Image: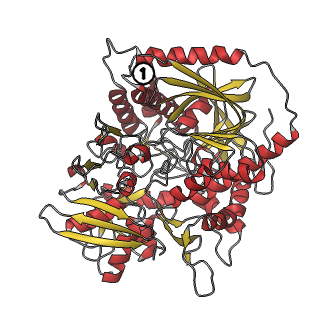
Amino acid sequence: MSIVINPDICKACGMCEKVCPGSLIKLNEDRKAYIKYPKDCWGCSSCIKECKFGAIALYLGADIGGMGSKMTVKSSDSELIWSISKRDGTESQIVINKKESNKY
Amino acid sequence: MKIDDRVILHTDVLIIGGGTAGCYAALTISENSDYQVIIAEKANIKRSGCLAAGVNAINAYIVKGRKPEDYVDYAKKDADNIVREDLLLSMSEGLNRVTEKMEKLGLVILKDENGEYVARGNRNIKINGENMKPLLAAAVEKLDNVKVINRLNITDYIVEDNVIKGAVGFSIDENKAYEIRAKKVICATGGAAGLYRPNNPGFSRHKMWYPPFNTGAGYAMGILSGAEMTTFEMRFIALRCKDTIAPTGTIAQGVGAKQVNSKGEVYETKYGLTTSERVYGTVMENLEGRGPCYLRTEGISSEQDDSLKRAYLNMAPSQTLKWIESGKNPSEQNVEIEGTEPYIVGGHTASGYWVDNNRQTTIKGLYAAGDVAGGCPQKYVTGAMVEGELAALDIVKRLNEESDSCTDDSYLDEIFDKKIEEYDSYLNNNAQVMFTAEALEEAMQKVMDNYAGGISTHYQFNEKQLALAEAKINQLIELAGDIGANDMHELMFVYELKERLIVCLAVIAHLRARKETRWHSFAENLDYPKKSDEWLKYVNSRYENGEIKIILRDLVGREENYEHSY
C-alpha cells in the first residue's frame, strides 16, 4: 500500500509531511516531499487530502492486486472530488458532498 | 549522534496519545476546569489514531427504543460473558451524549424528516465520518489550556510508590528528550497492531485493518510499570475484504450481503453470528475445501454499487480504488473476504488496563481510555470518547479535592538522566549492528504467527507452541538490546519494536492461562477445545520481578462500583 508524490507538482508546502499519521513523509533539501518508508504506508489517504496541488496519488501494491491505477482527491469547502486514472489513460471521478451522510 | 537537548515541562494533566479518546479527554477537562493539559502525540493529532481515513458509521449508539442496558447485553453476549458490565454500562450511558457533542463540532449525521437520527440496525447511526478526526483535532487546537506537542514519542512512565508522576520520551525530529511532570496522566495510546505476521507481509505489510502505528506503547509502559492488565487472551481478528483489508460491515449491513462459500452456500448461520464465530466460520469453510469465501454482492443494483463506492471513500478508499481498477462493480463480482492477523485492541475485544469505573488504572493517578483500556469491548469511536470523558471528569474532581502539596521531585532528574543514557546507547549503537528493528519485527511476527495462533495456523495453538513462542520472543527481547538507530525517527522504531515484544509476552502468558476455548479463533486452544464454566473469570496479569504473573478475578456485575484495593 503506498503513495507516489510527483516532485514536479509538489510546491514544497510541507503539509503532507505534517499530517501523515505514520510520519513517513520527509522533505528533501528543496523542501519537496518524498515518502521515506513506502512499505510502512497504511493507505489512509490523509496526505492526498491535505495536498492542495494534487501532487500525491494513492495506488495499490501489486501484492494486493494493484494494476497501476492512481487515485487523487481535491478538497473544497463542500466537496471531496476523487479522481482515478487507470494505466490505459482512462479517467473517472466520484464527487462526495461533505454535508451528505453515507447511505450505508 | 546523541540527545543534546533536554526539556522538562510541568502540567496538571498529561494525555499520552492524541487520538479519539485523548482529544475528547482534553476537551472535557477544558470544559470543566482551567487545569493545564499537555497532549503528547507521536504523529500529528489532525489525522492520528484510528480515524485517519475516516469512519463509516457511529457503531455504538443507543437508538430510539433501546436502552444502555441493551448495549451491555449485546457486548456481553458477543464476548461470551468475559466483560466488565459496570464499565460497559457507564460507557453505554454516555454514547449519545458524545455523539451530540460531535454533531455540534460539525459531524454530519443523517436525520429523517422528524429530525431524528437514522438508525442502521440496532446500534448504529449513519454519518459522513471522513473528517471526524480533523473536527475533533480542530476543537482541541482552539483550547487555551491545552498544549499539543506533536511528534513526541513517549517511552516510559515515571512512577513512584505506585503513584504516577509523569512520563519521558523524545522528539522524532530533533535530538531532544522530554520529561513531562504531571499530577495526573491519561494513557490513550490505542491498541497494538503488527504483533503477528500480517495478511500481506511484503510491500503492502501495513495494509492492515488496525493502524500500524498503534504499536502497543501504552500496554507496554503499563506492563513494565506493574499495572494490572486484563484479558489479553481475547485477541481481535477482523473479517475483512481480501487484499485491501477494508471493513465488511458496511457491505453486510448496507446491502444485506450474506457470507457465502465458493459453492454459493450461505455459511454464516452454521457457525453462529458473534464476531468471533463469523471469523471462525470463514476459517473452517476454507479448511474444509469450500473457500474462498465471499460477501454475496452479485445482483445488487447499480445505485447500491454507487452508494458502496461512496461509503468506502469515506473510510477505506483503497476498496473503492480496487473496484474501479478491476473494472468490476460489487454487483458483478462478490467481495472476497478473509480474517486479519490478530490484534490486541480494547475497543473491540476486552484487552487492556484493568480499570475502575472512573477508568483509573491500578497505578494511582494513571487513567486509561479508548483501545488501551480493558474490560469494555465494542466501544468503537463513541465509546472511546466516553472513556476519555469519564477519566477527565474524575481527574478534575480529584484535582479540585487534592491540596497542592509540594513534593521533593529532585530524584526525577536521575530517572531522566538514565533514560537519556538509554536513548543515547541506541543512537550510538551503529558500528557493529547485525540486526535492524525491521529484521527483528519480522522475526517477532513469524514467531507469533507460527506458535501463538496466527493466520498460518488458522489462529489455533497448543501449550507446547505457546511455550516455544515465549522462549523465542525472550530471545528477540535480548537481541533488541543490541540494535541501533541512525536518527530520532529510527529511535522510535526501536522503541516500537520493544513495546510490541513486551505485549507479545503478555499475549502468550494470557493465552496459556485460559485453559479453555471460549472464543473460536480469538483464543482457540487445541489442548482445551471446549469452554468451561470454571473459566467464567477474568484472566489478569501483573509484571513482577521480570515475570508476568497471572491473577484470576471474579466477574464484576453491572450494578457494582468496582474499586481497586491498593
Nearer the observer, A65 or A75: A75
Check disc 1 and report the residue beneath it: B480
Residue drawn where x is 33% and y is 81% of the image: B300
Q: Quadrant of residue B278?
A: bottom left
Look at the image and tell me in which quarter the N terminus of chain B lies.
Answer: top left
Compared with residue B556, is residue B72 higher up or lower down, i.e. above or below? below
Nearer the observer, B38 or B370: B38
Residue B9 drawn at (x, y percent): 65, 29
In the picture as drawn, the residue positioned furthest to the top comes out as B431
In the picture as drawn, the residue positioned furthest to the left comes out as A88
* Left or right of A32 on screen, residue B233: right
Residue B22 drawn at (x, y percent): 61, 47
Q: What element carries label 1?
A: helix
Residue B337 visible in image: no
Residue B59 visible in image: yes
Residue drawn where x is 41% and y is 30% of the image: B489
Look at the image and tell me in which quarter the C terminus of chain B lies.
Answer: top right
Which kind of residue does numbered mark 1 sit on? Ala
Residue drawn where x is 40% and y is 66% of the image: A76
Q: In which quarter of the image is residue B538?
A: top right
Nearer the observer, A44 or B178: B178
The colour scheme used to paint the residues is secondary structure
Residue drawn where x is 63% and y is 82% of the image: B115
Q: In which quarter of the image is residue B563?
A: top right
* Left or right of B451 on screen, residue B293: left
* Left or right of A17 on screen, residue B189: right
Nearer the observer, B67 or A89: A89
Disc 1 crowd, CA 10 A, few/some/many (<14, 14-19, 20+): many
Residue B3 drawn at (x, y percent): 49, 18
Residue B432 drawn at (x, y percent): 31, 12
In the picture as drawn, the residue positioned furthest to the bottom comes out as B113
